[in-house]
Image (cartoon, coloured by chain):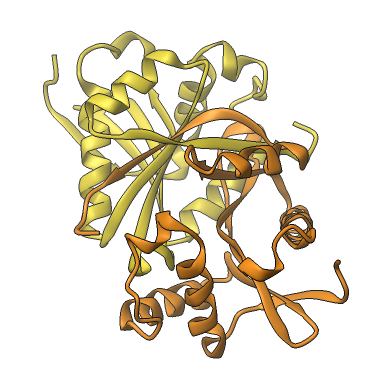
Chain colours: A orange, B yellow
Amino acid sequence: MIQNLTHRKATLKDLATIIGLILEDDELAQSRESQNVYDPRYADAFHHINADPNHYLMIVEDGAEIVATCHLTVIPSLSFMGSTRLQIEEVRVRKKYRSRGIGEWMIKAAIDYGVERGAKIVQLTANKERVRAHSFYEKLGFEASHEGMKLYVGDI
Amino acid sequence: MIQNLTHRKATLKDLATIIGLILEDDELAQSRESQNVYDPRYADAFHHINADPNHYLMIVEDGAEIVATCHLTVIPSLSFMGSTRLQIEEVRVRKKYRSRGIGEWMIKAAIDYGVERGAKIVQLTANKERVRAHSFYEKLGFEASHEGMKLYVGDI
């Protein structure tokens, strides 16, 4: 079970590990990612994320081992009386450490992070094929109130 | 029909008009917004949005009249080989100008804006109660592939 989890901001040294987590995720990721964790497109994206204080690429460690990651973005917004939102993307838990409560710990840490930065709404989208993810988030209080709509406009 | 539409970045002078558009929208907005378009919480949020080059609060004008608005955010991302995303929020068309193609014009302009900034994915969430919105976006090529999950953590 959960031992000694901590989270911190990812550094460039962590990038290959994070991409590895995205790749190992499941069949959805396999088809759309470069199999090379050192693909320079990942490093480019990392630098954009890392340079912007509204982004927090979270690494969760159990001791010295990276066991999970997610990407948080603080988004100011006019609606709901000017409520800041926290958006969660790229939620991944290392396969061999799943079903131990690490994902729950991480999402709760993400919510705390958002609340500390004034967020009133925490939001994410989950692919409809990831059925288990929906009940996971509903147990944490999320409601599937919206359709998450995507349009792919590039060669991906 | 569409006459002479243009878009530009909103300024503080436009804010009361934008909030008016959010308020007039429909029954969903009525219950959750301040009825005072000069509520300082809106101005605070505007300043955060305005100061960040990754945000574009779009105003659509027909001649000199503001007829629609949306809020665009450019989000760097690791997945899909480091693909930048464009997120669309707060889509509003002035009630008396609906069903004239203004919304379609605006979303296409938003997509163009995203493509110019390297976005490979354009994404938004639409409340499941807004049934007409779903077919509107599907006609523009969006797919409702995800559950849009929200958690409210503040007093809103």
Front residue of B39 and B148: B148
Query: Which quadrant of the structure image shows residue B76?
Result: bottom left
The x, y position of residue A74, in whole percent, is 60, 56
The x, y position of residue B81, in whole percent, is 34, 68
The residue located at (48%, 37%) in the rendering is A128
Q: Is residue B40 in sight in this rendering? A: no
The x, y position of residue B66, in whole percent, is 32, 27
- Residue A106 is left or right of residue A51, and the answer is right
Front residue of A89 and A94: A94
Query: Which quadrant of the structure image shows residue A114?
Result: bottom right
The residue located at (60%, 37%) in the rendering is B149
Give the vertical position of A96 relative to B13 (above or below): below
Image quarter in which the C terminus of chain B is found = top right
Give the vertical position of B23 relative to A30 (above or below): above
Give the vertical position of B81 relative to B132 (above or below): below
Image quarter in which the N terminus of chain B is found = top left
The x, y position of residue B49, in whole percent, is 50, 52
